[in-house]
Image (tube, rainbow, N blue to C red):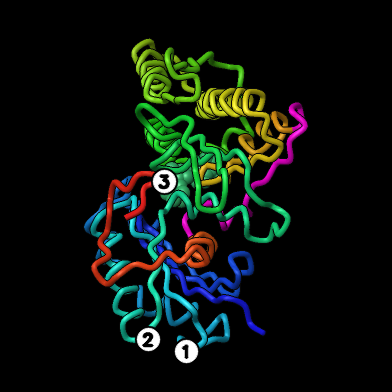
Amino acid sequence: MAGVRILAIESSCDETAAAVVEDGRRVLSNIISSQIDIHTLYGGVVPEIASRKHTERICNVVSEALSAAGTGLADIDAVAVTYGPGLVGALLVGVSYAKGLAYAAKKPLVGVHHIEGHICANLIDHPELEPPFLSLVVSGGHTTLVRVCDYNSLEVLGVTRDDAAGEAFDKVARAIGLGYPGGPKIDKISNEGDPDAIDFPRAKVGDAPYDFSFSGLKSAVLNYLNKCRMSGEEINVANVAASFQKAVVDSLCERVDLGLSELGDKVFALAGGVAANKHLRAGLEEVCKKNGVSFYCPKPVYCTDNAAMIGAAAYYEYMAGVRHGLDLNAMPSLKLGERI
Ligand code: KG4
Ligand code: ZN
């Protein structure tokens, strides 16, 4: 007998994506139409362009997801969609489309929190992974240390006070002329640089040991670049990238190390676009090894935005009886753990 099949839609930022996922862990199809080429021309995501491109592409992306899964709408148990957080216009395209589809096909509608989706990307292809576990979500918009107590229960331990880790990668990459999106470019060029060449700061947030801060680090990189330019000193881009990346990785590893040793969790799962970073994966694997903890990380394609992760998260919501009405709205600032 076929399991529970969910058609999931994701359009919170610059990827138009749809997937069919069975029982939360088996991906039958995963279609991603990326807009990176267009936004690269402007050095970052332009919200109005993102909304328009989602509108142009969503019909084909959903049809492709159904046909690649070898299924039709009739065999789908529910339609799931990311309803926040994200760019409001971009989210609205997915939410409106999902509502129309659910209404026309007489299927239940399940709204999903984008970050819960990122965390649930770890469940794909890892049948043995079950809560409770500690998770670090590092994306373009979020840096959050969270304890996944159960499938539908999260406890936020720490968040960034300013820039997200991915945002810092993107801004520094732009400053050193690598272009958008910066994360993968810094990841790559760092292999040719010396991570100890420049001593960039690792910020601590005094009263909140699990909170993060990256804007001081970003400013330190900008100041360093200015200083070099003013004194005519040559800038070694690979060294700047490697040293900046090491500072980010150290900050993230330190909070995870603290969380694991204080909370005693034996399982850790990394999530979000920055989780694709090889150096971060290696650093956290080391931290987990030291603490005798199992390390999980999604495949790179499930780290950056995709709809399979939304289908994985939606399954546990669906099984818990979560259903949204046709009044579901895009929630650009939806908090983690908050349900509308
Ligand atoms: O999760 P995601 O696709 O979108 C958001 O929900 O924000 O994350 C995108 C972020 C971007 O800031 C991008 O630069 C970063 O993830 N990223 C990386 C890598 N691949 C993507 N950062 C560091 N190293 C990478 N390999
Ligand atoms: Zn994301």
- The residue sitting at 49% across, 77% down in the picture is 65
Q: Badge 1, how many Cα within 10 Å: few under 14, some, many 20+?
A: few
* Mark 3–mark 2 distance (CA, rounded to whole Å): 29 Å
> Does the image show residue 141?
yes
Labels 3 and 2: the sequence-earlier one:
2
Disc 1 residue type (three-letter): Ala
- Reading the image, the residue beneath label 1 is 74
Disc 3 residue type (three-letter): Gly
Where disc 1 sits, the SS reads helix
Labels 1 and 2: the sequence-earlier one:
1
Q: Is residue 3 above or below residue 81?
A: below
Residue 217: where, in percent of width, then height? 43, 21
Viewer-nearest of discs 1 and 3 = 3
Q: Is residue 148 above or below residue 200?
A: below
- Reading the image, the residue beneath label 3 is 337
Tags 1 and 2 touching, CB below 8 Å: yes
Q: Quadrant of the C terminus?
A: bottom left
- Reading the image, the residue beneath label 2 is 105
